[in-house]
Amino acid sequence: MRIGACIVLLTAMAGAALATEIPPDQRRSGYSFMSPDTKAMQDEDTANPGMLSVLDGEALWKRKAGSADKACADCHNDARVSMKGVAAHYPAFAKALGRPVDLEGRINLCRTNHQQASPFAYESRELLALTAFVAQQSRGLPIAAGDDPQLAPFVDKGHALFMQRQGQLNLACANCHDDNWDKKLAGSAITQGQPTGYPLYRLEWQSLGSLQRRLRACITGIRAQAYDYGSPELVELELYLMSRARGMPIETPAVRP
Amino acid sequence: MANSDHTTRRTFLGLTGGAAVLVIVRPADATPAMLQAAIRNVVGEANVRAGKVKLDIPPLVENGNTVPMTVSVTSPMTADEYVKSIHVFNEKNPQPNIGNFHLGPRAGRAQVSTRIRLADSQKVTAIARLSDDTFWSATADVVVTLAACTEEAI
Amino acid sequence: MPSALINVPKKAKRGDVIEIKTLMSHIMETGYRHTASGDVVPRDIITSFTCRFNGTEVFRADLYPAIAANPFITFFTTVTESGKFEFEWIGDKGFSETAQASITVE
């Protein structure tokens, strides 16, 4: 019965006119859709379980790794200075690869190239912790992703993907997150999909997770085949979403239901 | 789970799992008998009266995995008169106990907060034991909404 | 590598009632979940949390699977002298972690 109701709702959405971009002054973080209790969990560091991962990441930042026997701190020193504002510019263009990489991808490139260590697996405790620690240094700073002109074709690809209907429910990201935000899907608020706080602590996950994990869950939700972790499609989607959220403050580590 | 005399099978239809339907088979709920036994375990044969206890828990929660809860007891906190302990129980999780919190006169204020899991919409009961070995309680109803787009459990 | 976050005021006046907030990283696996192949995921929870001040227990909690992942516990205590709070979490599979925080009482 529930699923019946959901499909009716989703089908109604699918029939609605496409797709008006959200005017800049109407953009809202997922935070604004949350209950006061969940907001309180994010607001205070001792109450925010995401901060436990940030602490983990701080320890990893200082730990030597790989055959180069170097820690992140050996090159980048104090992250509070060197990483301030960095996450606001990700995904960023990686010259050597000729394509954008997200913050997780950048950290793994650092590991393989400079520490000569094996890359961390996607969603591993270590990669999430280091990413959260680096991103937290930009908390409160405006998102500035997508400025680099070399990124333009990739932003366009991500945008196209955002607009493209797919899966058995034949839905595009835009059907929910441009056209129907502030409505409800079952008990949940439909947000604008502004990726302001990743990696973030999701009550559903009971752990920290990446934007790619969230995107994969959404894609599975519309019953399409999710792209693999680290695939160019997911990075392009991340890039489009971050450029769509340009100017909004970073909240890492955010808390979401 | 000695007294699991009824087994509830619950099928949540999530909008997930590709084409597959997500099926979660939960173990038996705590039965009313289990809940009573868990409470008797704490209070023995004593009467439990309503009052003095305040149970602060949102009536409607966004996710049952992490529900904030505060229990406070109206009582002096002196060497002669204080709250010894606070015990929290639920009705429909697989197990009736949530937590026991042991205080004493030097707590200064009889109030604890934590975050709990609620497998379903249900009642939560907090019982306080005072220094005179009387028991006082408060009960709250919580509605747990089901999220639309969830991942498979494991 | 578990981490803990503790919030204790650095200073207080003699006789003040202070609030202590604690957050410990832990999965709190209930023992009631199954894998896709039907195996029970074994219980792995913190079962006990204790706070001592200068060696004397001031607060203790017994935890059950219904406590959310990454247990967050806050409580109050009256401070009478400067000293050290010690926090201890004990659980399944030999889990044992401690943390400390000092307070100056004026």
Image (cartoon, rainbow, N blue to C red):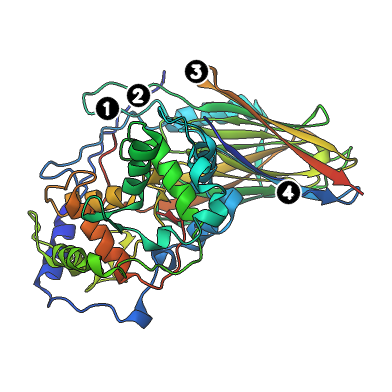
Q: 10 Å neighbourhood of mark 1: few (<14), some, or many (≥20)?
A: few
State the CA–CA distance, disc 3 to disc 1.
20 Å
- With respect to residue B118, does B31 lie above or below? above
Q: Earlier in the sequence, mark 3 or mark 1?
A: 1
User: What is the quadrant of the C terminus of chain A in the image?
Assistant: bottom left
Q: Amino acid at mark 1?
A: Thr
In the figure, is residue A229 to the left or right of B124?
A: left
Q: Looking at the image, which residue is at 17% across and 54% down?
A: A233
State the CA–CA distance, disc 2 to disc 4.
36 Å
Residue B129 in view here? yes
Q: 10 Å neighbourhood of mark 4: few (<14), some, or many (≥20)?
A: some
In the figure, is residue B41 to the left or right of B93?
A: right
Residue, disc 3:
C93
State the CA–CA distance, disc 1 to disc 4.
40 Å
State the CA–CA distance, disc 4 to disc 3.
31 Å
Asked if both marks, 3 and 1, belong to the same chain, the answer given is yes
Residue, disc 4:
C19
Residue B124 in the image: state x and y as whole percent: 51, 44
Judging from the image, mark 1 belongs to the subunit labelled C
Q: Looking at the image, which residue is at 38% across and 68% down?
A: A144
Q: Amino acid at mark 3?
A: Lys
Q: Looking at the image, which residue is at 9% across and 54% down?
A: A167
Residue B148 in view here? no
In the figure, is residue A173 to the left or right of B117?
A: left
Q: Which mark is residue C35?
A: 1
